[in-house]
Image: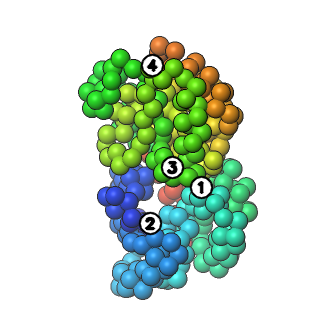
Amino acid sequence: MKILFISSGNAKNGISPIIKNQGQSLIDLGHQVVFYGIKGKGIKGYFSNIFKLKKFLKNKEFDCIHAHYSLSAMVAALSGAKPLVVSLMGSDVKESRFFKYFIMFFNSFFWKKVIVKSKDMQKASGLDEVYVIPNGVDVKKFKPYTKVEALKITQWNSQKRHILFAANPARFEKNFILAEAAFELLQESEFELHTLVDIPNDLMPYYFNSADVVLLTSLWEGSPNVIKEAMACNSKIVAVDVGDIRKVIADTKGCFITGFTPQEIADRIQEASSLEQKTTGRDTINHLTSETIAHQLIKVYKSAIS
């Protein structure tokens, strides 16, 4: 099968690593995947790409076209891309109630099949007929290392306990303010708080394995990949109850769901970091490997084609 992936091309290295990894999982199954990145931000920036994409699609044949994120899917639809499968992200249906009307319109007239990342997203989207398929995890890349091995890469202080805030603090929805408030309740001489800013995807496993606790305090999420990637590394996790996180971590010892109060988060960080052993998170998410998810995507593509 020949598949075109359409997504934002605004990431530091062009296409988002999440999209690249998903495409690679299809390539590993023997399919051909072509990536097309849309340059530009906001509605005006995205829609300026309509004629560029239309020109790209001319005289090219794809069995299926998969657009990632609603604005990419709108541009693809107006460029004549068919048959069009759309993956919505958490921000598509969480940030703006008004924007959901555009999603419902395009879903009714242009989009063949729609994928959301969690049941929570399905409910928030207002769409009835959707596939719930989270992003898969490349378990060959994201795997446990010893802390000694990992610290050689991250160069963090081996005498400290490390909390990894699993996002860029500049993103409002990631709620770094809450993480800082919880951190201030800890013995700061014992802990260090780290964030993720422009870390190459290939190095991410070392950051998860260097951390004593991976922390997520987002206001909303769909199905956050950092949690699944941390699970694949057998990392200890403290996360608020958003998206599908509760379902993903299940009853894994060393992984905690909290409310949105700094004291509760600080208490769970203290509890998680005091556990000597790594978790069994990798076994918990063996149904979320990239290969397993790739097979589910192929079923959706075949349904769109038929």
Local crowd at mark 2 within 10 Å, few (<14), some, or many (≥20)?
many
**Label whose residue precedes the other's in the sequence (1 or 3):** 1
Q: Amino acid at mark 1?
A: Gly
Please identify, in this view, whether the residue under mark 4 or under mark 3 is nearer the observer: 4
Q: Secondary structure at mark 1?
A: helix
Q: Are marks 3 and 2 in contact (CB under 8 Å)?
A: no
Instruction: Give how far across and how far down residue 144 sits, in percent.
Output: 38, 27
Q: Earlier in the sequence, mark 3 or mark 2?
A: 2
Q: Amino acid at mark 4?
A: Glu
**Label 4 – label 1 distance at C-alpha:** 35 Å
Kindly check if marks 4 and 3 are in contact, taking CB atoms under 8 A apart as contact: no
User: How busy is the neighbourhood of tag 3: few (under 14 within 10 Å), some, or many (20 plus)?
Assistant: many
Q: Point out the tag, 4 or 1, that comes first from the N-terminus.
A: 1
Label 3: which secondary element: loop
Residue beneath disc 3: 135
In three-dimensional space, the C-alpha distance between marks 1 and 2, rounded to whole angstroms, equals 15 Å
Count of picture labels: 4
Question: Viewer-proximal residue, 283 or 51?
Answer: 51
Q: CA distance from mark 3 to mark 2?
A: 15 Å
Residues at marks 4 and 1 touching, judged by CB atoms closer than 8 Å: no
Residue drawn at point x = 65 percent, y = 58 percent: 94
Of labels 3 and 2, the one closer to you: 2
The dot on residue 53 is none
Determine which residue is flagged by label 4. Answer: 190
Q: Nearer the viewer, residue 47 or 155?
A: 155
Q: Which mark is residue 7?
A: 2
The kind of residue on which mark 2 rests is Ser
Please state the horizontal and vertical placement of residue 169, each as a whole percent of the image.
48, 46
User: Residue 90: which numbered mark, if any?
Assistant: 1
Query: Counting residues from the N terminus, which is met first, the one under dot 1 or under dot 2?
Result: 2
